[in-house]
Amino acid sequence: MAELFRQVRLLDPVSDTDRIADVLIADGTIQQIEPQIADLPEEVEVCDRPHLILAPGLVDLYSHSGEPGFESRETLDSLMQAALTGGFTRLTLLPDTHPAMDNPAGVDRMRSLLPQAGPTPQIDFWGALTTQVKGEQMTELAELATAGVIGFADGRPLQNWALLRRLLEYCQPLGKPIALSCCDRQLAGNGVMREGLESVQLGLSGSPAIAETIALAALLECIETIGTPVHIMRVSTDRSVELIRSAKGKGLPITASTTWMHLLLNTSDLQSYDPSLRLEPPLGNSPDQTALIQGLQEGVLDAIAVDHTPYTYEEKTVSFAEAPPGAIGLELALPLLWQKLVEKGNWEGRSLWRCLSTNPACCLGQSPAQLQPGHTAELILFDPQHRWQVTPQTLKSLSSNTPWLEREISGRVLRTYPRKR
């Protein structure tokens, strides 16, 4: 059956347009986009809610799957349902499953576990850079590339610079993205939040900002020398933004992303000691948060990642310092970012969509979704005014480790049109 959206708001970051129009979709394809469509098919379902937003599906750069190995946290089925509920039509999974995706058999195993029935997002996999993602021994990168991984990443900071240099050299001819996060573990020590006055006041061990920036500066030196393109994950400090700005000014082949929670929160939000706010890297201070938002606005940072990291109730219901780092976010990122950045008048809707859809696809070497007649309807229908309460029952994810649990928020994806298989 065909579907007609009457006078819906279209957000298209590819053509840089934000307009009101009628949209006709049939057989998984965008048939027409006109100011008004009068000539309709015989069987058509009409949606006449002018405040809704129709826009390209979202793309997540990196998130974690519980399955295989930790199905109590998240199965692939629940992960994909959470992604679709949150508007993500493409999902890219890190290789730190159990067993890890560090060889072609591991990648094939993951593919065999993917649900085959019903609508699903496009799932891609990062192949591990090192065996068992331990940062000690390089994997067979060429074999992983042949197995069809989207690119290479451990999802954990590498500490062996000689190994990192060899990885950059070996990855260069493979022509696939390589994603790296930056942290000097010795400098970070046992820190569980950003070092500063607030860490002292809260009595929590602090991790200094230079644990990230020293590692980032060293990585940028390697990239400048070797020339391998790199995506820099989980940028969290204002100084990191400046280092990336300088590196891009020199023409280094880099892209960069921060995570959605680092845009919404900072160290002042840790007074609750909520274990779901224990993140890696830790939340920055207020200047860090401001610099990350400005970095995205100015194009210094390219994309926003979700870094969905599920943990069970038992794993997270411990003291802040003992909690494993990470939080879920696939169902929450869009509505909360919309309220924080767009509703308050700081960003245009197209800018947010560019950071959540178009730019992440480009960072992965993919073609972004097109909101044009004749193209596949890889779209989402978003109601920014829809209010709902975040509970274990309303979430599709098996885990509920989020600081917004039991709170009412605005914004809900009403429908997701994933890509045709």
Image (cartoon, grey):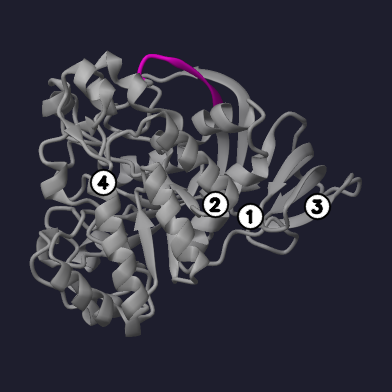
- Identified at 55% across, 34% down, the residue is 413
Q: Amino acid at mark 3?
A: Ile
Residue 1 on the magenta segment:
no
Q: Which mark is residue 250?
A: none
Residue 356 picture location, percent across and down: 52, 47
- The residue that label 2 is drawn on is 357
Residue at the spot of label 3? 33
Badge 1 or badge 4: first in the primary sequence: 4
Q: Earlier in the sequence, mark 4 or mark 3?
A: 3
- Badge 4 amino acid: Ile
Residue matched to label 1: 377
Pointer 4: what residue?
Answer: 210
Measuring 23% from the left and 68% from the top, which residue is drawn there? 108
Tell me where residue 216 sits by quadrant. bottom left
Does label 3 or label 1 sit earlier along the sequence? 3
Residue 23 lies, with reference to residue 382, above or below; the image says below
